[in-house]
Amino acid sequence: MPVNDDLRPYLTDHGTPIGVDFPHSVGGTTREPAKWTDTMDPATGEPLARVGTATAAEIDDAVTVARAAAQPWSALAPSERGTLLRRLGALVRRDADTLARLETRDTGKPLAQGRADLAAAARYFEFYGSVVEGFLGDTIPLGSAALAVVEREPHGVTGHVIPWNYPAQITARSVGAALAAGNATVVKPADEAPLVALRYAALAAEAGFPAGVLNVLPGGAEAGDALTGNPEVDHVSFTGSVATGRAVAGACARRGRPVLLELGGKSAHLVLEGADLDRAAPVIARALLLHAGQTCTAGTRVIVHESLHAELVGRLAAFFNSATLGPGLTDPTVGPVVTAAQADRVRGFIERARSDGAVVAAQAQAGDLPGFFVAPVLFDAVRQDSELFAEEVFGPVLAVTPVESDEAAIAAAHDSRYGLTAAVWCRDVDRALRTARRLHVGQASVNGYAPGGGVELPFGGVRDSGYGREKGAEALREYTRTRTLFVDIAPA
């Protein structure tokens, strides 16, 4: 099916279900699934599209297909794999408007964010298609009587468990690196938002990828367990919750296979004495409101020096009070959250925070909207011993906590089981940099905030935020393993 022609009629009206079925993609072709499910439109609460949801047997079959494709794919020169990845990136750019609208309808995010996600996705395919040609091994100096070479080779078959919040970006970053390194892939997008990942498979076939190197089967827990537990899957990349990530790590450990975990976050903005609030406030607000707070790097805690506390809260309140809510295709400030269950979960956090003494400093107006909308809330005076300070909400809720010193700000930032990202705001760059380098996180920003960083920047967490690194050239190391070759050279 041409990517544009069959979908465009359904991607201009946010109330129209998509009249196209989305089967599995295995071995370069579509396959009729054993089971179908409806993915829901977050903006209306009504069915959006019919999608295949994979059984364990279907996952196992896709792994078998990937295994057959893995060796011939890895045998290609990096330049050949790179050419195909760059071609895939070009096709994503060609169809970017359609894919962005599909992502918006599937996840609920504003259209501007959907477009940004597809631009980033194209960059991932292009970046890995280029950088792989310079991905080198090592030699170890042992003198004239021996030679040692360290090669990097693909794992073989990699499994990719993709979450529902950023499927277009996360699929591209994970699969792009794995394919560039020479792995064959089996991708399991979440049932809630699998549509763009399935379209990538169609575009890969159009680009000329060999059959079997990119297989996409949406599914739930049954499919996830089958993928992470399959003995023929050599490496797993998982993005999702801490609890599920631990289960995935356990499944891989039982098989003795490596896993990359990108888990939750309770990322903090440290606004130190002397910070430029004209610069900080818009970034803090937009990072939180970006996708209704459904971003692990959203920056959901603001730890601010008491001298700037009142002014910063007033500036942030203006963004919350003026935020617009609506279907993603209307490009509001904030779209819906992904499911009714997620909306109920976020509302529970809001009510408990009120009961716990947090002060509502601002709240947007949701109006009478169908679908899964939660009005963004700015909470002030959030205690460090409260649930809102400690736990990941994954919704449009921002918590502000005043402190009296830089040391207190650092201690508050570390008062969390997570360690994904952070930002430090201060006009004194030396002071800001000293503070940032003391933070136990995978990525820290100074006087800016790049949630997740750019395509080139390694990204991942510490502690309960996971381990391993996606993005940048570092991801190519994650998706390869080393082999050391030693040669004993006889004397002349």
Image (cartoon, helix red, strand yellow):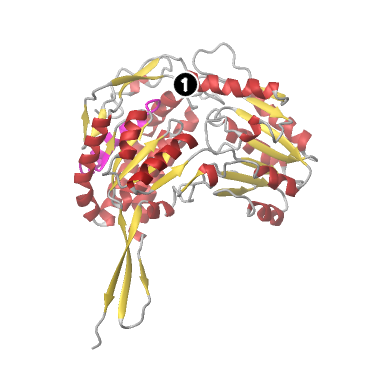
**Residue highlighted by disc 1:** 339
Say which of 212 and 255 sits in front.
Answer: 255
From the viewer's perspective, is residue 164 above or below residue 149? above
For the C terminus, the image quarter is bottom left
From the viewer's perspective, is residue 326 above or below residue 300? above
List x then y, in percent, for residue 452: 51, 43
List x then y, in percent, for residue 98: 37, 29
Q: Is residue 71 left or right of residue 301?
A: left
From the viewer's perspective, is residue 481 above or below residue 119? below
List x then y, in percent, for residue 199: 31, 32
The span picked out in magenta is 191-214
Which corner quadrant of the image does residue 197 belong to?
top left
Say which of 89 and 425 sits in front.
Answer: 425
Task: Report if residue 386 lies within the magenta region.
Answer: no
Say which of 76 and 383 sits in front.
Answer: 383
In this view, the residue farthest toward the bottom is: 492
Q: Residue at x 24, y 36 (%)?
A: 60
